[in-house]
Structure formats: C-alpha cells, structure tokens
Amino acid sequence: MAIPEFLNTIEQSALSTWIRETDSIFGFYFVLLLHNFALATLVGPSAFIDLRLLGAARQIPVKSLKPLYNVITLGIALATVTGVLLLIAYPTKALTNPLFYFKLLVIGFGVATVYRLKAKVFDNDSMSESEMIVAGKTMAKWSIVLWIAAITAGRLLAYTYTHLLYGQGE
Amino acid sequence: MNLAHLHLLLNHWPIIGTLIAFALYAVSFLGKNEDLRRGGLIIFAAMALLSIPTFLSGLAAQAWMKHDTITTALMKRHENAALLTLGLILVTGTLSLWGLWQTYRDGHMAKWATASILLFATLTVIMVIRTGNTGGDIRHTEVREHPDAMVTEGTFGSIVHAFEPNAAKFGHAMSYTKWCTAILMDLHFVGLCLVIGAIGITDLRIMGLAKVIPLKLLHQLVPWGLLGLGINVVTGLMTYIGEPTDYNFDAPFWLKMGALMLLGLNAGVFYLSGTFDHIQRLGAGDDAPISAKLIATSSLVLWVAVIVLGRYIQVYSHNMPLPPT
C-alpha cells in the first residue's frame, strides 16, 4: 500500500524536523519523558480510584477522592499535547502501524470511562458510600483493563513499527 | 574510580547486615521481644534494597577484571551464587515488609509470615556466606584452597552448588526475543503507575493537595505502591540481566539506582523518626507537620528523578568510560 504523501509533508515541516534532530535537551526524548509523566499522572490516580471502588483501602471515604480528578485531567491534557508532538515527529511510524489506531481507540474508551465514572458517581452528591461503590464497580474494572491495554499498546509501538520515516522500511 | 570500586564499597554490607538481622530475628523469639523482631525485619528489608546495586555493580566490575581461565571460572561461580542470593534476599525483604505491615495492621504477625521469614532468612544467610566466599576467592589468592588449581568445592560448596542457577543461561532467556524485553518493559510501566497512584498521591496529600482525603487512612494504600515497586524491581532486574552491558556504562542508570537507595533512606526516616506516628493522628482537612512535608517532597522529587533517569537510560548508554581491553 502506498504511503500517503501528507505524512512526508508533516515530517519535512520545521517542527517535526526540530523535535527529531535538535541537539537541545528539549527535543524528542524530553517530549517522550513528559508523555511518561502524563501517563503516571493520569493512570496513577485513576487506578487509585478504581482500586478503592473495587475494595482496596476500604476505610478511605470514596467521596474524598473527588479532587484526584483534577490531577487526572492535568494528566490527560499533558498526554494529549505531548502525544500530538510525538505524532508530529514521527507521523509515518505511528500512522502506518495498526497498533497505533488500537491505542487511540483504547485511550478514547479509557478517557470516556474515567469521566463517565466521575459524572455518575462523584458528581452525584446525594449518593451514599455504598451506592457509589455499587454504581462505580463495573466502570472501575473497565478502567483498569483499558489503561493496562493502553500502556501495553503504547509500549509495543516501539517494537512493532514497519516504517520509521517516510521512504524507509518495507 | 570505576564500578569495581563501587562493588568493593558495597559487597560486605548485605552479608553483615543479613547476619545481624538474622541474629536479631532469632533472638527475638527467645524473649518474645517485639522491638528486636521489628529491628530484624527492617534490616532485612534494607539489605534487600542494598543488594540490588551490590549485584549490579558486581556484574559491572567483571568488565575491569583480567579474564584468565581461573578468574573467569571463579567469577562465573560467584555470579551464579549471587543471582540466587539476590532472589532469596529479595523474597526475605518482601516478606519482612509484609510482616511489618501485618504488625502495623493487626498488632502481630501471622504464623505463616513468621515461619516463612525464618525459612527464607536461613536460606539467605547460607547464600550470602557462599557468595562472600566465592567472591573472595576471585581476588584473594591467599584464601583459595588450591591457589593454582581451577575452581574447587568443599562439602558445603558442592551441596550449595547443586542449587545454583546458571546466570548466563538465565540472562539469555530474558533477552531471547525482543518480545521478552517488550513485555518486561510493559509491566515496568504498569508498576510505575501503581507507585505514583499510591505513593505519589500520598506524597501530594501530605504536601497539602486534596485535604479532604483523611491522611491516616491513606496509608492503607501503601501495599499497592509496594506491589508496584516489587513489579518494577523484578522486571527491571530481569531486563538488566538480559543485556547487562547495555546498562553497565550508563550514567543515568547508576544515578537511578542511587535515587532508589535514597528513597529507601527517605522511607526509613519517615517511619522511624516519629513523623509517621504524627501522620496517623491526622484526619480529613488536617495539615501535615513541616517535617512530613519535607519528607513527602523529597520522596516525590526522588520518584520524578527515577522516572527521568529511567527514560534517559536508553539515550545515554555507553556514556561512561569503558575498561581497557
């Protein structure tokens, strides 16, 4: 299958070239590092909420965990910005790999689950602790599964690409 | 200075520490002395942590050794013994932390925990002695039984030898395909999220974020953080053993190990200085004391350092001076 020309256009752009080739410490690996931090800021607190709903640390009031959504939102914002920059740096590498689309899909569901959980469980002040747990349990399970799938897919992108740059590879 | 220095600096500590911890733990049964038992468990956990850079620096130190036939055979024997010791000391350290957790939660340790710590501590003692002896043989010709002969085993050595793994084969298995590394690294990221989810959030709460979360209850999440740490110690070591030369001359890698040791020290200060006891009296809305805030800040800074340095391992491999060939 021919690789679309627009990927080459993105790769030749000044920003893409700069991220890949600059000698500055703020180049590719720095963006990748921030993407890692975003992952930890997003999945860490989300996993905390999920584990609590599934029975860990029972004495902590579920309600008190609501402020963690601010941390999660910060993580999502940072992951999106750094993710787009990484995509601009290596568009051919990402967009010719089916796994990348799977990753996007899983992340879409993951983010949707996180905010659905917030809307259904945490934004409803009339719910008791036990009602919150009943309402949130299934979403918590899905959230854990989706985040592990997203991490796995993201990690494996480094091992499964066929074209690193436009005109390279098969 | 090179990494052989680091190995010489570190290698006696896990041996002496394990023997002291074992003595404290054993004596604690005689007088039913809980403080001695706790002391023993804390030292076991600390030695497990310290054994990580000791093992790593040992593999790195090999690069500086003269590879004649005898030395190579002796180093191989020492490495095999060290790999088994590392496994045992990590199990003992993990069980010790679990025992400390049970004591905190229930006021006493479960019988199975007490017994399994005793079992694994005994095996660890046997193996640190074996590892110390085989390590000494490499450099100290005066203590070898047959100075000019190849590797020889006495009664003790030949029994223990039957149980020792082949470190080289183990390493090959870890890097057999790129998928082994890929899966190990994937789990390493999952562990990272658990650590940040449990310990990072606790740090942030102590520092003053999300004060509605009752501080004393947040501590119940610590085992999940330790599970994440455990996953990462195991997957990290397995990846290292797969390709040690990728890491031996890598400055971010050694700095990351240094940050990990400081995190152990930080945790020690937190639990043993009375700060933890203070935290245990604080509920929702309460502000943590300044000492706790300092410890939490240094914990968070060190975890960030671990992530940064880990990310740059790949970028800076082979940036340290190589041994003369």
Image: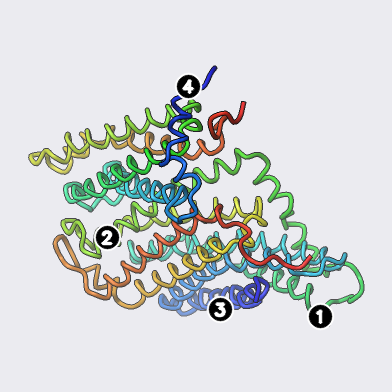
The residue carrying mark 1 is B143
Chain name for mark 3 = B
Horizontal relation, residue B223 to residue B115: left or right:
left
**Label 1 in the same subunit as label 3:** yes
Between B108 and A14, the residue placed more toward the observer is: A14
Q: Is residue B266 above or below residue A124?
A: below
Q: Do the CB atoms of the residues marked 1 and 3 lie less than 8 Å apart?
A: no
**Could you tell me residue B10's position as x and y percent?**
60, 75
**Could you tell me residue B42's position as x and y percent?**
46, 71
The residue carrying mark 2 is B204
Chain name for mark 2 = B
Q: CA distance from mark 3 to mark 4?
A: 67 Å
Q: Earlier in the sequence, mark 2 or mark 1?
A: 1
Chain name for mark 1 = B
Q: Earlier in the sequence, mark 1 or mark 3?
A: 3
| Element carrying mark 1 | helix
Q: Residue at x 84, y 77 (%)?
A: B144
Q: Residue at x 53, y 75 (%)?
A: B21
Q: CA distance from mark 2 to mark 1?
A: 53 Å
Check residue A4 in the rendering and tell me which mark sits there, or answer none: 4
